[in-house]
Amino acid sequence: SAWNRTLEHESNQTLRDELFQKRSEAFSNLNQSLEAAKELENMSPASRNPQNLIRKGALYSMVGDFPSAEKAYLDSLSLLPGDVDTSLSLAKLRIQQGRYPDAKDILNSIPEISLTPPQSRFLNQLKEQVPHDSTETSDNLSVLFSRPEFYILTLIGFGVVFYLRKKIF
């Protein structure tokens, strides 16, 4: 095809990378996410920037290649540590994988004061998707009375202890 002939004859790496990026965009517009991600893989290491890596992570995530998506997000964070968009994307990926503690750590590390309104909404949506950890309430006795069945079992337990107090103590 014309794309391949253009790449074969182009010796300037910067122009080749631009062509790979344009091809990736074209494949993405055709809903061919895997092909779009592969085009970004063909870019030279020197031209990889955080935005392309975030895009590559999103494309891999769409096709279910979570290890490749995670690698792209982590590579982006190595170039731009603390980037909010990358951190949010990585947290979303880990939620999709069921890695809730990892996702929660990422979400809690994002300073909410620096977020734009869309980022703040996305952060809150992601936080809602992380199940509440039961270990947070295990140190609090109120968990014994938080649900009716716990309340009944707690009362039965206290009753048994009271009845057997002379034998136990």
Image (spheres, rainbow, N blue to C red):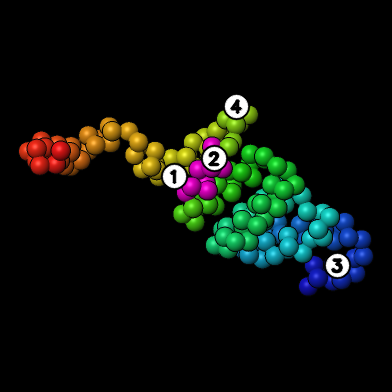
Q: Is residue 88 above or below residue 113?
A: below
| Circles 2 and 1: CB atoms closer than 8 Å | yes
User: Start and end of the magenta stretch?
Assistant: 100-108
Alpha carbon separation for disc pair 4 and 1: 21 Å
In terms of secondary structure, what is the magenta stretch mainly?
Answer: helix
Relative to 75, 99 lies left or right:
left
Which residue is labeled 4 in the image?
113
Instruction: Name, please, the residue furthest toward the left.
Output: 163
Q: Report if residue 23 is visible in the image.
A: no
Give the class, few, some or many, for how many residues have Cα within 10 Å of label 3's Cα (few <14, many ≥20): few
Is residue 107 one of those drawn in magenta?
Answer: yes
First of labels 4, 1 by sequence position: 4
Alpha carbon separation for disc pair 3 and 2: 43 Å
Q: Residue at coordinates 63% horizontally, 65% vertically from top-left?
A: 34
Tell me which amino acid carries mark 4: Ile
Alpha carbon separation for disc pair 3 and 4: 47 Å
Which residue is labeled 1 in the image?
130
Tell me which amino acid carries mark 3: Thr
First of labels 3, 2 by sequence position: 3
- Element type where label 1 sits in the image: loop
Alpha carbon separation for disc pair 2 and 1: 10 Å
Which residue is labeled 3 in the image?
6
For residue 37, the mark is: none
Quadrant showing the N terminus: bottom right
First of labels 2, 1 by sequence position: 2
Which residue is labeled 2 in the image?
107
